Amino acid sequence: QKEVEQDPGPLSVPEGAIVSLNCTYSNSAFQYFMWYRQYSRKGPELLMYTYSSGNKEDGRFTAQVDKSSKYISLFIRDSQPSDSATYLCAMRKSNYQLIWGAGTKLIIKP
Amino acid sequence: DGGITQSPKYLFRKEGQNVTLSCEQNLNHDAMYWYRQDPGQGLRLIYYSQIVNDFQKGDIAEGYSVSREKKESFPLTVTSAQKNPTAFYLCASSPGGGRSYEQYFGPGTRLTVT
């Protein structure tokens, strides 16, 4: 069993919809939880990170962590075609190692 | 402009040849990383370095080698011992002080070995 599970999609939604992206994990020792966005043929870029359970909001993006269920989510409000990308969740295993989900490909249709 | 550069963007090699991928950063970051990305899989850590002249194996180090002689540079050599070298290779860096969650990536090198 992988330490981090993420549905690869693709997930296709119409412009303006609310998008929900999710990851589950098995290691209760994970502390930091990150969401990275990767455009095609580019390197990933950090969108958001959270340390504890709860919600963190940044503009149209909200990251949610539920440690009791070992479940994290990223919500995108008022989705735009420019949000079309692959979204990778990552979790910190040690001071220098992250464990990554497979990434979910998101397509926002105009 | 601060950032990470990787070269070349595309690389083609014959089986049995060693190849070195370049990674340079001007962010003054202490830590640097090499990942491999294959379709349908998450990023897998090959090697990482927390400080100059020191590096550690990641989960899939077999068939790869690195050096960290300068803070700015962390080249990766894909040797002929790597069984399946065709992949997208990503280099990243992060500030020190345990801020490994904040990784900055280069544009990647797509290596094709035939």
Image (cartoon, coloured by chain):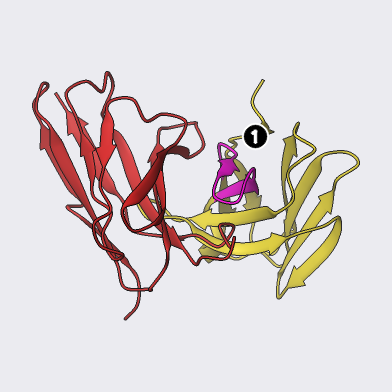
Chain colours: A yellow, B red
Q: Is residue B78 left or right of residue B31?
A: left
**In the image, what residue occupies the spot 75% across and 34% down?**
A27
Is-magenta flag for residue A86? no
Q: Position of residue A87 (x, y in %)?
A: 57, 50
Is-magenta flag for residue A92? yes
Tell me the element at label 1: loop
Q: Quadrant of residue A98?
A: top right
Q: Position of residue A34 (x, y in %)?
A: 65, 55
Quadrant for the N terminus of chain B in the image? bottom left
Q: Count how many numbered circles sit on residues in the image.
A: 1
Residue, disc 1: A7
Q: Is residue B14 above or below residue A84?
A: above
Whether residue A85 is visible to the viewer of this picture, yes or no, is yes
Q: Position of residue B5 (x, y in %)?
A: 27, 63
Q: Quadrant of residue B16?
A: top left
- Mark 1 crowdedness (10 Å alpha carbons): few <14, some 14-19, many ≥20: some
Q: Is residue B2 left or right of residue A6?
A: left
Quadrant for the C terminus of chain B in the image? top left
Outermost residue, right direction? A68
Whether residue A110 is visible to the viewer of this picture, yes or no, is no
Outermost residue, bottom direction? B1
Q: Position of residue B21 (x, y in %)?
A: 20, 46
Q: Is residue B16 above or below residue A47?
A: above
In front: A45, or A67? A67
Please give the range of residues in magenta.
A87-104
Amino acid at circle 1: Asp
Q: Disc 1: which chain?
A: A
**In the image, what residue occupies the spot 62% across and 43% down?**
A11
Q: Is residue A95 above or below residue B89?
A: below
